[in-house]
């Protein structure tokens, strides 16, 4: 019987690449996304719970959860709407991750080999200028993943975190090609942005049965950027 996976934010970017790769490996994949049908806002806990229940009714109990839903929210502390930006980043990137975990948790525990993979960012390991709301939310995802690993490991569920670096997704589409190239030459040893599929490869690897002893890992997938800049 096929394993069942929930992928939040699975209609675009890294989430979509992960969903497609999981499906190619024979996993039954359900995507929860704000652009889905029905739309699922991960910051709304009752909506997430209903969506997960629907998945279980149609596909069976969830054994894999990939939390890829996220928003990129920046701002200066003195901006009038900084508090609103802060709340939005926390609500989607951090609270949304928690909502999905709580909704899937009974099924992950019952499987005896549940897998949680949370998507943070290299900015969950550091920070960029004027990026406080986003960086704080992604640091929170890193900390939450570690807490999950400690709390759930003896109950048969692993939790790990991927920290992508510069990746060609909708979040970076507004950056000009020349600016992307300049950034990559300066900060990324591989000299380029990642394709979403390159991030998805590591996500899916952590969901496989063979990854049963990987727990609480925080893994940069960034072309060497973290190594170069630390």
Image (tube, helix red, strand yellow):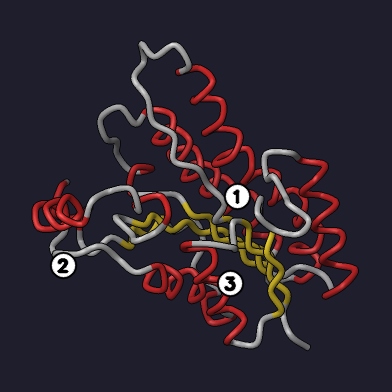
Which residue is drawn at the image coordinates 54% and 56% (left, top)?
68
Residue under label 3, please give it. 19
Q: Residues within 10 Å of mark 1 (few under 14, many from 20)?
A: some
Whole-angstrom CA distance, mark 1 to mark 2, is: 32 Å
Whole-angstrom CA distance, mark 3 to mark 2, is: 26 Å
Residue 214: give x, y in percent of width and height.
Answer: 49, 68
Residue under label 1, please give it. 148
157 to the left or right of 197: right
Quadrant of residue 109 within the rendered picture: bottom right
Compared to residue 94, the image places residue 146 above or below, namely: below
Residue 41: give x, y in percent of width and height.
Answer: 69, 45
Give SS at disc 1: helix
Residue 140: give x, y in percent of width and height.
Answer: 49, 37
Q: Residues within 10 Å of mark 2 (few under 14, many from 20)?
A: few
Residue 186: give x, y in percent of width and height.
Answer: 9, 52
Q: Earlier in the sequence, mark 3 or mark 2?
A: 3
Quadrant of residue 139 within the rendered picture: top left
Front position in the image: 61 or 213: 61
Q: Earlier in the sequence, mark 1 or mark 2?
A: 1
Q: Residues within 10 Å of mark 3 (few under 14, many from 20)?
A: many
- The furthest residue to the right: 57
Residue under label 2, please give it. 190
Give SS at disc 2: loop
Compared to residue 184, the image places residue 140 above or below, namely: above
Give SS at disc 3: helix
Compared to residue 203, the image places residue 225 above or below, namely: above
Which residue is drawn at the image coordinates 15% and 58% (left, top)?
181
């Amino acid at each position: 019987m096929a394993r069942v996976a929930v992928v939040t934010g699975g209609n675009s970017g890294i989430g979509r690449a992960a969903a497609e790769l999981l499906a190619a490996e024979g996993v039954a994949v359900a995507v929860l996304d704000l652009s889905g049908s029905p739309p699922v806002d991960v910051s709304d806990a009752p909506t997430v719970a209903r969506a997960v229940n629907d998945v279980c009714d149609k596909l069976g109990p969830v054994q894999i959860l990939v939390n890829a839903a996220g928003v990129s929210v920046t701002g200066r502390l003195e901006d009038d709407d900084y508090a609103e930006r802060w709340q939005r980043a926390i609500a989607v990137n951090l609270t949304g991750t928690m909502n999905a975990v709580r909704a899937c948790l009974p099924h992950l525990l019952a499987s005896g080999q549940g897998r949680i993979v949370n998507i943070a960012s290299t900015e969950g390991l550091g920070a960029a200028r004027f990026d406080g709301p986003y960086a704080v939310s992604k640091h929170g995802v890193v900390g939450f993943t570690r807490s999950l690993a400690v709390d759930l490991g003896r109950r048969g569920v692993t939790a790990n975190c991927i920290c992508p670096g510069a990746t060609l997704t909708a979040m970076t589409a507004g950056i000009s090609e020349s600016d992307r190239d300049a950034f990559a030459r300066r900060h990324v040893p591989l000299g380029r942005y990642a394709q979403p599929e390159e991030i998805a490869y590591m996500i899916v690897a952590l969901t496989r049965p063979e990854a049963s002893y990987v727990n609480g890992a925080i893994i940069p997938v960034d072309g060497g950027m973290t190594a170069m800049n630390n």
